[in-house]
Amino acid sequence: MLGAMIGDIAGSRFEFHNHRSKEFEIFHKRCSFTDDTVMSLAIAQAIMDYAKILGSGDIDIRKSTLMELAIKSMQNLGRQYPYCGYGGRFERWIFSDNPRPYNSFGNGAAMRVSPVAWFNKADTLEKLKFLSLQVTGLTHNHTEGIKGAEATALAIWMARRGSSKQAIREVIERDYYRLDFTIDAIRPTYEFNETCQNTVPQALECFFESESFEDLVRLAISVGGDSDTLAAIACSVGEAFYGVPDDMKKRALGYLDETLLAVYKKWEDFLRSQAQANANA
């Protein structure tokens, strides 16, 4: 999730003023967090609440408990940041007394999904896909929205488990998207697009072509388009594969206010507790 936040923050000043080069100051005074960061943290909070309910039990794919928790968390946190860049339909959903899915295939499905891939109880592909659907289908229940989130979650999940880029690419190309392009080839003509099907493949290709986490941030933003969200998706995978340099983590967390930082610190504690539980198992 930290990767998604860094991509969001670094890309925020370029969303409507694309920068088609890898040369730029990553953390600038005009950068800020946007809805990508807020919603990623909301999903992280829902995962933590879900883990408490499960306790020592396992995920039950017959129950929509996580979806209910995600709705609550997304509305509770989202309503505190009404001007952070929501799309029109999503903003209405955030403030609705009866939030319902609206058949969206927007790229917001993929930018917020990363926390599910860090939940250790998602220890099989079936469970991972179930959790991805739970935090996606509450708004983005179009097949393309579901696919974009699932492809992103799967790439993170595989990277966390030590898969090579080639192995991840093979699964993505077999089951989700044809990646028959290079970033250099599409950069001159790639335009702003808020759909999963025209953001997730480009974000994943950035990951596959990158050489380090910092290089990934720069490469993702250089593509143009919906810069903050494309970079958030790409860097969510990059975090799992490369890790995040300490200095970049420190700079990024400096953009969060007390409320968001508190959620992130709880998430760090949660990840540490998972790691400790695994070590003791």
Image (cartoon, grey):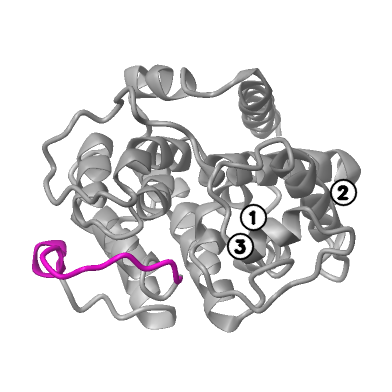
Residue behind mark 1: 123
Q: What label sits on residue 57 in the rendered view? A: 2
Residue behind mark 3: 88
Mark 1, Cα crowd under 10 Å, few <14 / some 14-19 / many 20+, is few
Specify the amino acid type for callout 2: Gly
Residue 11, position in %: x, y?
Answer: 33, 42
Q: Is residue 128 visible?
A: no
Residue 90, position in %: x, y?
Answer: 65, 61
Look at the numbered disc 3 and give the secondary structure of its residue: helix
> Residue placed at 22% from the left, 39% from the top?
212
Magenta stretch secondary structure, dominant: loop
Residue 273, position in %: x, y?
Answer: 69, 26
> Residue placed at 32% from the left, 52% from the top?
16
Marks 1 and 3, how far apart at CA:
35 Å
Specify the amino acid type for callout 1: Asp
Marks 3 and 2, how far apart at CA:
38 Å
Along the polypeptide, which appears first: circle 2 or circle 1? Answer: 2
Q: Is residue 73 visible?
A: yes
Q: Nearer the viewer, mark 1 or mark 3?
A: 3
